[in-house]
Amino acid sequence: MKAVVITVLGGPEVLQVQEVEDPELKDDEVLIKVEAAALNKLDSFQRQGVFAPPQGASPYPGLECSGTIEAVGGHVSRWNVGDQVCALLSGGGYAEKVAVPAGQVLPVPPGISLKDAASFPEVACTVWSTIFMVSRLSSGEILLIHGGSSGIGTFAIQMAKYWGARVYVTAGSEEKLAACKDLGADVCINYKTEDFVARVKEETGGKGVDVILDSLGQSYFQRNLDSLNFDGRLFLIGTMSGSVTELDLRVVMSKRLTIQAAGLRVRSPENKAVIIREVEKNVWPAIVAGKVKPVIYKHFPLTEAAEAHRLLDNSQHIGKILLFP
């Protein structure tokens, strides 16, 4: 099969399509003929050598895909050859075929094309497992999303609105903020021209928000704490600005704050399967009802993976970027 290979660590130009061996299918896995794969920031970090794939994962990038099941392992009962699915991967999505544990596979939601379904697994599992399963965002609360125009951000806006929450977002351009507003965001803050803490306090009468979803880490840490209401929850899903910071515990104690953090790729297959079941039960109905829609910025053929990564790295896109084999 053909797959995108990271030939050496470096910039987008190191990505090359090569002929490689087909994946080996284990008893608890299905083999998917890939229709589309979606890009994620972790793919770029892997290409640069910031993060290595988990032990036993495919060396090829790609954390989510859609396609048609081509074969099933001996212990798999739910899925059959020919089923159209999308899947959460530990790697290997940038290829013509990928093997994935059966518990990490989801049916394509009715009304969604097979190609567009590739945009859902990673963002749906990230958003549901953080601000809903752990931070327990509830109807009537306020969620602040940093990077509201990202793949995760655009999905989180829609899901939080479906759940009855108010949504604040930050983004770095008026075009991105307009896209967030169109998706349902209630308050849109340009972090390049506004102090988001001051705007949050202004909009909430000095109280603050209830939940924050942040992938920046260090540079926003103290300001995030300042932006939270009493009993607020900060959920960290990345450290793009740095991973080391200082913490005044008195701030946490006085406001009864909770600081939470998690990654998705490094979780065990068993843990991912739990999240997948929750997503199918709670998120898929919102997609079927048309309340959460795919937000796709651009499609590239597999042979143009390097160009797709250049777009990913410059962060000018809104929503998801897809690759087609």
Image (cartoon, rainbow, N blue to C red):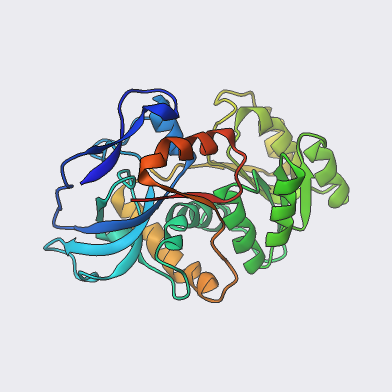
Query: Is 48 situated left or right of 183 in this image?
Result: left
Q: Is residue 248 above or below residue 89?
A: above
Residue 54 in the figure: left or right of residue 297:
left
Q: Position of residue 125 (x, y in %)?
A: 46, 55
The quarter holding residue 82 reads bottom left
> Residue 147 location, x and y as percent?
64, 43
Q: Position of residue 37 (x, y in %)?
A: 39, 51
Q: Quadrant of residue 159?
A: bottom right
Which residue occupies 68% across, 37% down? 252
Q: Which residue is depicted at the point 72% across and 39% down?
A: 172
Q: Does residue 62 appear in this view?
A: no
* Direction from residue 145 to residue 290 in the image, left or right: left
Query: In this rendering, would 172 be left or right of 5?
Result: right
The residue furthest left is 74
Q: Nearer the viewer, residue 83 or 285?
A: 83
Rendered position, 54 above or below 211: above
Expressed as whole percent of the image width and height from the top left, the position of residue 130 reads 53, 51
Determine if residue 306 is in view. Answer: yes
- Residue shown at the point (33%, 47%) measured from the top left: 93
**Numbered label tally:** 0
Q: Nearer the viewer, residue 34 or 27?
A: 34
Which is more toward the observer, 313 or 226?
Answer: 313
